Image (cartoon, helix red, strand yellow):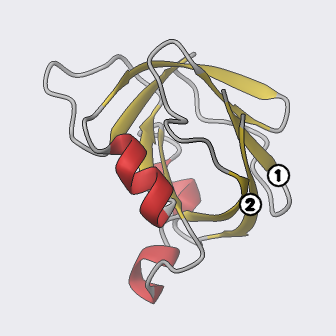
Amino acid sequence: MTKSVVKEIGVLVPTFKEDKILILFGPQAPKELREMAVIHEFENLEEEPLKQGGTIQFGEESFTITALGDLANKNFKELGHVSIYFQEPMEEVLPGAVFAAPYSFPNTINEGTVISVK
């Protein structure tokens, strides 16, 4: 299981709630991206943490991964970056995108929230 801890929540993160998009970035994210992202730091990282049918959990809230782009795992491992769409997968999945169900923005993301991927 891959585990990460939320360190910081960008001021613009709530503005993406309506679109049901959550952007994750590792601690090295540049200033202009920090405002729109949830900054997290890995405690434990598996080789291919993201997989279709797998789960991503924010605290106690669990979501099933329904689709992911070709570069999602690479970007997640190298940069801690992934864009999670809590909506129906598009026909053309962007390379760094992850789609997850249920289609609702997580309610429990705060500094210190544990993100688990399995």
Reply above or below: 76 against 2.
Answer: below
Q: Residue at x 15, y 18 (%)?
A: 91
Q: Residue at x 51, y 75 (%)?
A: 35
**Where residue 38 sits in the image (x, y, percent)?**
60, 61
**Where residue 69 sits in the image (x, y, percent)?**
28, 34
Question: Is residue 44 shown left or right of residue 47?
Answer: right
Which residue, as the protein is rendered here, is positioned at the far bottom?
A: 31
Which residue, as the protein is rendered here, is positioned at the far top?
A: 53
Q: Amino acid at mark 1?
A: Thr
Q: Quadrant of the C terminus?
A: top right
Q: Amino acid at mark 2?
A: Val
Q: Residue at x 43, y 84 (%)?
A: 30
Q: Earlier in the sequence, mark 2 or mark 1?
A: 2
Q: Residue at x 77, y 27 (%)?
A: 61
Which of 85 and 54 lies nearest the eye of the viewer? 54
Displayed quadrant of residue 32: bottom left
- Marks 2/1 in contact by CB < 8 Å: the verdict is yes
Reply above or below: 85 against 67.
Answer: below
Q: Specify few, some or many for label 2: CA neighbours under 10 Å numbering under 14, 14-19, or 20 or more.
A: many
Q: Secondary structure at mark 2?
A: strand
Reply above or below: 9 against 61.
Answer: below
Give me the disc on residue 22.
none
Displayed quadrant of residue 111: bottom right
Q: What residue is disc 1 on?
A: 113
**Where residue 86 sits in the image (x, y, percent)?**
48, 28
Question: Is residue 104 shown left or right of residue 2?
Answer: left
Q: What residue is disc 2 on?
A: 6
Q: CA distance from mark 2 to mark 1?
A: 5 Å
Q: Secondary structure at mark 1?
A: loop
